Image (tube, rainbow, N blue to C red):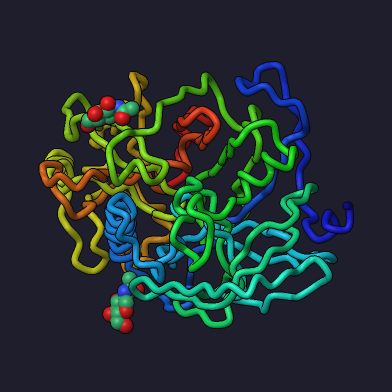
Amino acid sequence: MFSAVSLLTTVLFALSTASSPVEIRSPLITLPFARSLNTRDGTVNLLQHDQARATALRGRGIATAAGELDRRQGSILVTNEVAHYIAAVGIGSPATTYNLIVDTGSSNTWVGAGIPYEVTSTSVDTGEPVSATYGNYSFSGKEYTDTVTLGCLTITQQSIGVASQSAGFSGVDGILGIGPEDLTVGTLTNEPSTGIPTVTQNLYTQGTIPAEIVGISFEPTTTTSFRNGELTFGGVDSGKYTGTLNYTPLTTTSPASRYWGINESIAYGGTTILSTTAGIVDTGTTLILIASDAFDQYRSLTGAVSDSATGMLRITTLQYIALQNLNFNINGVTYTLTPNGQIWPRSLNTYIGGSSSYVYLVVNDIGVGSNSGSGLYFVNGQAFLERFYSVFDTTNARVGFATTPYTDAITN
Ligand SMILES: *[C@@H]1O[C@H](CO)[C@@H](O)[C@H](O)[C@H]1NC(C)=O
Ligand SMILES: *[C@@H]1O[C@H](CO)[C@@H](O)[C@H](O)[C@H]1NC(C)=O
C-alpha cells in the first residue's frame, strides 16, 4: 500500500476537524496538484480555447439530454489546452505515476497522451474500444480496468481509457474526470446504461471515502507553473477556507444540469448584469465567461475595450483603480470578486499576447445571449475558483463555496 506514497512524495494527510461541516470518519484523501500554463506555442489565445470549450460542453449537454450523443464524442474531449490543473495519479501495481488534468467537466479517467500506459499485474484489457474526437482534441484506444492510486489509498478495478493515439494534448498524460457520473454514459460501445463508475464513485462504493464529495482548493498564481492546488476526496479540508461553507443545489436547467451546474446572478458594483440563471462551475476553463448581454454591460460599466491581440477586455491602470467589485449571488450568498480578482496576472500579460502596459480582465463573453434558451449562461472557471474554495458534492446534489485567505489577496 505504501509503495505509491514514495511516488507521490508530496501527498498530505489531513484529518477531519470539528469545524468541518462534513462528518469525516476516515482520513481524507488529499492530492496536491499544480497549475501549468502551456507555453509550447509561445503566446496562447485563452479566450478562443475557453469559448470553444463552453460551446462544446453546451453541445454535448444538449445531445446527452436528447439521448443523441454520438458515441465517438465521449465526455473526455473538451479540455483547455492553455491552463491545466494537473494531479499526479498512480495506476497499476507497482504504480506508474501519470500527470492527469483535473477536470470537473468530464467523468472518464484516461491515460496515454504522454508517457505510454504501463501494463502490470493489475491491468485488465476489457477489449472494449474507446475513441473520442471533439474539435481539435481526440484520442482513441482501449478500455482497461486497473488499480488507481490517489494519494495513499487505492481504487481497485477502476475503468480507465488507454489511448493508443491522441491529438491536442501536450505535456499531460490524460484526464482525471471528476464530473458527474452520468457524463460517462455513451463513452463506450458496450458499457452499462448507467455509465462507467468514476473514481469518486468507486472510492465511495469500495468504502474508502464516507461520501461522494470532492473539495478543491486553488490559489491565484502569477507564474506559468506553480504547485498550489489541493484536491480532497471524501470531504472538505477546513484548513483551506475561511468563514462558512455555503451550498447551493445543483441546477435543474439543462444542459447546465449535466455538469456541475448551479443558478447564480451577477452584479457589477450595485448593477445586476446577469439575472439569476443557470451555468456551470468548471476547473477546465481559465476565465469567467458570462452571457453576451451581461458581458456587454460589464464592458460598458468598466469602460473596457476589446483588445484585438488577446481577445480579452483591456483597461488602463487608471480604470483599474476605479474598478468595482463583481458580486456573484449564489443561493442567497454573495461571493465578491475584488478588482484584483478580475484581472489577469500582469506578469503573464505577454504570455497571452498582451502588452505589459495594459490591464486585462478575466471576464469574457460565453457567446450566447441570456435570452437564447441555451441553458448554460456562465462558466465560473479557474479565475473564480482561485478565489473561492469549492465543493462538488454528489451525495447531496450540491455545490459549495467558501472564502479563502486568497479571496481578497492582491496578487495579480
Ligand atoms: C483548431 O485547429 C484549427 C486548424 O488547425 C486552428 O485554426 C484553431 O485555432 C484550433 N483551435 C483551437 C481552439 O486550438
Ligand atoms: C434555477 O433556475 C431555474 C430557472 O432559471 C428554476 O427553474 C430552478 O428552480 C432554479 N433552481 C434550481 C435548483 O434549479
Q: How far from the left and from the top, in percent, is residue 116?
A: 67, 79
Q: Quadrant of residue 218?
A: top right
Q: In the rendered image of this protein, does residue 7 appear above or below residue 25?
A: below
- Residue farthest along the bottom direction in this orientation: 165
Q: In the rendered image of this protein, does residue 364 appear above or below residue 27?
A: below
Residue drawn at point x = 58 percent, y = 51 percent: 198
Q: In the rendered image of this protein, does residue 55 appear above or below residue 210?
A: below
Q: How far from the left and from the top, in percent, is residue 71?
A: 40, 67
**Foreground residue among 346 and 59:** 59
**Foreground residue among 15 and 212:** 212
**Foreground residue among 141 and 265:** 141
Q: How far from the left and from the top, in percent, is residue 302?
A: 18, 41
User: Does residue 35 show up?
Assistant: no
Count all numbered tags in the image, as a single digit: 0
Indicate which quadrant contains ligand 2: top left
In the rendered structure, the answer to whether residue 251 lies left or right of residue 149 reads left
Q: How far from the left and from the top, in percent, is residue 344?
A: 37, 52
User: Does residue 294 show up?
Assistant: yes
Residue drawn at point x = 40 percent, y = 63 percent: 78
In the rendered structure, the answer to whether residue 350 lies left or right of residue 268 reads right
Residue drawn at point x = 27 percent, y = 65 percent: 310
**Foreground residue among 87 and 134:** 134
In the rendered structure, the answer to whether residue 266 lies left or right of residue 3 reads left
